[in-house]
């Protein structure tokens, strides 16, 4: 398969005016760009030369229900023609926002009773934190200022989210203090020396988490936020999250589930909190909520949280212009209608298993692959690489191999994250497997001459 010329030409001078997030283009002279796409067809993205790339990452976990999905696009187009924008703050009514909230409460099985609609995963998380503090202050508890989050988890990139969740390196860079956050370790049963079967496990990991939390005082912690499965694709045992739920409940700490990625069937259950069989106090959804088409996020609250705030004189002094944007609401309603009709969690589980088994078998003989793991259609291939030197060069080489094999994946070295659309079938899953294996075989070969 040839390497498209246009792919190499994408990094050109026309981009001078554009600032892009998470790229080091100015420093990295050899940066390898993904191709520019001008068209799409269900699970493929198409370049201007007509080359089709398999979208095995659902375009950053957003287009979980495929590209050019008419069942979602047609209602959005109709809404645009009718009334594209209205307001929902300042006592304006927005029927679509109300309908969407009812739908969200319904599909999350009435575990929540109130919803705030914002625009991005980051704003959804920020609102979870705002409500957390509003809740504690409503109870006249002024001590709880700390939020617990897990190492390797990602919750967004506003200053507020960084303040409570960022790593030490970011705290320094963005002039926030480490006083308001505590970083926790996720367990990793596959490398744990004391791991038994789940039922018999003594849960040393949970004991150490408890010790960590106690070191700042449980009475000072406002909430713990969990990204159920992070980009390291480590699967904590169900009992671990259950224990955290018990601990938080007992100690007046709120539990927030950030399901920006795992929501809507990604891991083979409709939502991760259902898979783990626990009831968080706050749930955040975005990305697949609108099939990535328009920016929208939902933060859902359990009844007790909102009731407590309603009892007090406090209210949410917050509101952003594009919150509950009418057309964005329609994109979410249409996506949920499509999701509800098709039971994609079952397909996610079946297709995910098929891909996992196939990849494990085929990648066994590659030295650079140390593990293949995951749940539903959220899979990770872990590479066995020395990343101390030439991190970017190795990453760009890997990317080239994927581009050559016309497949899109998410790379966070040493992990390759595979998250295909949830409405995929066996034929496309097997094609994903073939292209991945081919790309990794090439990478191993080329790495030898590195
Ligand atoms: C788990 C999780 N939470 C929050 C966010 C932030 O979402 P956004 O990029 O839409 O602000 C992301 C983004 O990738 C995420 O993966």
Image (tube, rainbow, N blue to C red):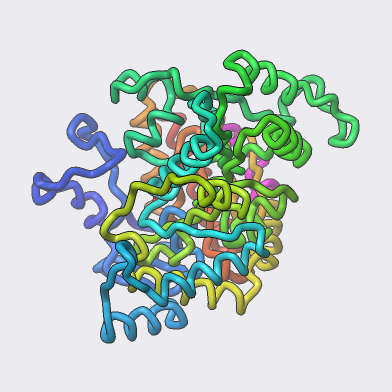
Residue 165 occupies quadrant: top left
Residue 422 occupies quadrant: bottom right
Relative depth, front residue between 230 and 97: 97
Task: Give the residue at x 85% y 29%.
Answer: 201
Task: Give the residue at x 61% y 61%.
Answer: 265
- Image quadrant in which the C terminus is located: top left
Answer whether residue 157 is magenta in the image: no
In the depicted structure, whether residue 202 falls above or below residue 438: above
**What is the x, y in percent for residue 183?**
53, 24
Farthest right residue? 200
Residue interval drawn in magenta: 359-369
Farthest top residue? 215
Q: Is residue 418 left or right of residue 236?
A: left
Q: How many marks?
A: 0
Relative depth, front residue between 195 and 418: 195
In the depicted structure, whether residue 132 falls above or below residue 120: above
**What is the x, y in percent for residue 166?**
42, 28
The reply to whether residue 406 is in sight is no
- Image quadrant in which the N terminus is located: bottom left
Task: Give the residue at x 26% y 73%.
Answer: 85
**What is the x, y in percent for residue 445?**
48, 37
**What is the x, y in percent for residue 409?**
46, 51
In the depicted structure, whether residue 215 falls above or below residue 56: above
Q: Is residue 143 left or right of residue 162?
A: right
The reply to whether residue 419 is in sight is yes
Relative depth, front residue between 277 and 344: 277
């Amino acid at each position: 398969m040839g390497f498209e010329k246009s792919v190499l030409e994408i990094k050109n001078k026309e981009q001078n005016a554009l600032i892009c997030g998470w790229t080091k283009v100015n420093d990295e002279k050899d940066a390898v760009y993904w191709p520019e796409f001008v068209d799409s067809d269900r699970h493929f993205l198409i370049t201007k030369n007509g080359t089709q790339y398999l979208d095995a990452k659902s375009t950053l976990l957003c287009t979980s229900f495929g590209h050019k999905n008419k069942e979602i696009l047609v209602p959005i187009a109709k809404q645009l023609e009718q009334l594209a924008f209205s307001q929902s703050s300042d006592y304006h009514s927005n029927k679509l926002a109300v309908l969407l909230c009812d739908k969200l409460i319904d599909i999350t099985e009435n575990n929540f009773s109130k919803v705030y609609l914002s625009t991005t995963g980051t704003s959804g998380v920020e609102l979870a934190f705002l409500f957390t503090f509003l809740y504690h202050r409503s109870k006249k508890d002024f001590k709880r200022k700390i939020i617990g989050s897990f190492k390797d988890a990602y919750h967004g990139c506003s200053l507020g989210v960084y303040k409570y969740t960022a790593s030490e390196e970011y705290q320094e860079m963005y002039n926030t203090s480490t006083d308001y956050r505590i970083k926790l370790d996720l367990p990793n049963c596959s490398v744990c020396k004391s791991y038994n079967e789940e039922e018999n496990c003594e849960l040393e990991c949970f004991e150490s988490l408890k010790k960590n939390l106690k070191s700042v005082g449980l009475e000072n912690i406002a909430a713990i936020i969990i990204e159920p499965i992070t980009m390291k694709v480590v699967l904590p045992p169900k009992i671990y999250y259950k224990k955290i739920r018990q601990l938080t409940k007992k100690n007046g700490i709120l539990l927030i589930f950030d399901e920006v990625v795992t929501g809507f069937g990604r891991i083979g259950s409709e939502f991760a909190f259902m898979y783990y069989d626990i009831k968080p106090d706050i749930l955040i959804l975005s990305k697949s909520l609108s099939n990535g088409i328009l920016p929208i996020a939902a933060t859902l609250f359990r009844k007790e949280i909102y009731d407590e705030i309603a009892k007090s004189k406090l209210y949410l002094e917050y509101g952003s212009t594009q919150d509950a944007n009418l057309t964005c609401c329609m994109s979410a309603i249409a996506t949920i209608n499509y999701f509800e009709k098709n039971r994609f969690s079952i397909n996610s589980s079946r297709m995910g298993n098929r891909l996992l088994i196939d990849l494990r078998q085929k990648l066994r003989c590659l030295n650079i692959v140390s593990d293949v793991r995951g749940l539903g259609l959220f899979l990770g291939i872990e590479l066995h690489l020395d990343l101390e030197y030439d991190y970017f060069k190795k990453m760009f080489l890997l990317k080239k191999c994927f581009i050559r094999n016309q497949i899109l994946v998410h790379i966070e070295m040493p992990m390759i994250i595979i998250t295909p659309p949830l409405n995929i079938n066996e034929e496309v899953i097997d094609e994903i497997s073939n292209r991945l294996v081919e790309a990794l075989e090439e990478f191993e070969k080329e790495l030898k001459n590195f």
